[in-house]
Amino acid sequence: MRAFVPRVVLVHPQIPPNTGNVARTCAAMRTELHLVSPLGFELSDRYLKRAGLDYWPFVELYCHDNWEAFLAVSRVHGGRLIGFSTSGRHLYTHIAFRDDDWLLFGSESSGLPARTLAICDATAYIAMAEPGVRSLNLSVSAAVGLLEARRQLGHLDARPPADND
């Protein structure tokens, strides 16, 4: 595992392109991606690969057979479990992120299971202006949460974009 954390964890993701997009974000941010089975797709899925483009070699990917297997790994490595959910208790920008946090995101259809949220050290929500919208897309939520954590921790000092003028 990389020395730099926080880490992104997708618990029971169902839609291959969403997971591929999260993988691409993790590659760009040099952030570990942990997938907790059961998954709603095979890792060989062409839509998963397409969404991640040619960045898969840059993804530090860990797959866990189930929630209990992931939990055992997280306990060995330490750190807090931060669950992102529409029912979270804290606005995500109000959480003081730490380098050893595990940022947990649930499946597209049901979010994180109640038993998972119950053992999280903190739960976060991403505010939305329109009450008629239930939630943001999984890949958007993961990017928002990860980038805020990195911003707070001072880990956004990567190269500037190329000059396109």
Image (spheres, rainbow, N blue to C red):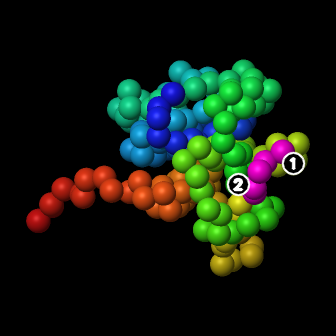
Query: Is residue 142 located in the magenta-colored stretch of the structure?
Result: no
Asked if residue 121 lies in the magenta stretch, the reply is yes
C-alpha span from label 2 to label 1: 12 Å
| Residue at the image position 65 percent from the left and 63 percent from the top | 95
Where residue 16 appears, as percent x and y from the top left, is 58, 36
- Which residue in the rendered view is the most extreme toward the bottom? 129
Looking at the rendered structure, the secondary structure element under dot 2 is strand
Q: Which stretch appears magenta?
A: 119-123
On screen, 135 above or below 42? below
Please identify the quarter of the rendering in which residue 39 is found: top right
Which residue is located at x 48 percent, y 57 percent?
Answer: 153
Residue at the image point whose x is 11% and y is 65% from the top = 165
Which comes before the other along the chain, label 2 or label 1?
2
Q: Is residue 69 left or right of residue 45?
A: right
The amino acid on which the numbered mark 2 sits, given as a three-letter code, is: Phe
Judged left or right of residue 105, residue 157 is left
Residue 17 appears in the picture as rendered: no
Residue at 38% x, 57% y is 156
Q: Tell me residue 50's x, y (percent).
A: 44, 34
Mark 1 Cα-neighbour bin, 10 Å: few <14, some 14–19, many ≥20? few
Q: Nearer the viewer, residue 122 or 83?
A: 122
Side (left or right) of 30 relative to 69: left
Q: Secondary structure at mark 1?
A: helix
Callout 1 amino acid: Ala
Picture coordinates of residue 73 (x, y %)?
Answer: 68, 27
* Residue 113: percent from left, percent from top: 83, 44
Depth check: 105 or 107 in front? 105
- For residue 84, which numbered disc appears in the image? 2
Is residue 80 at all visible to an observer of this figure? Answer: yes
In the rendered structure, find residue 118 and report the number of the disc placed on it: 1
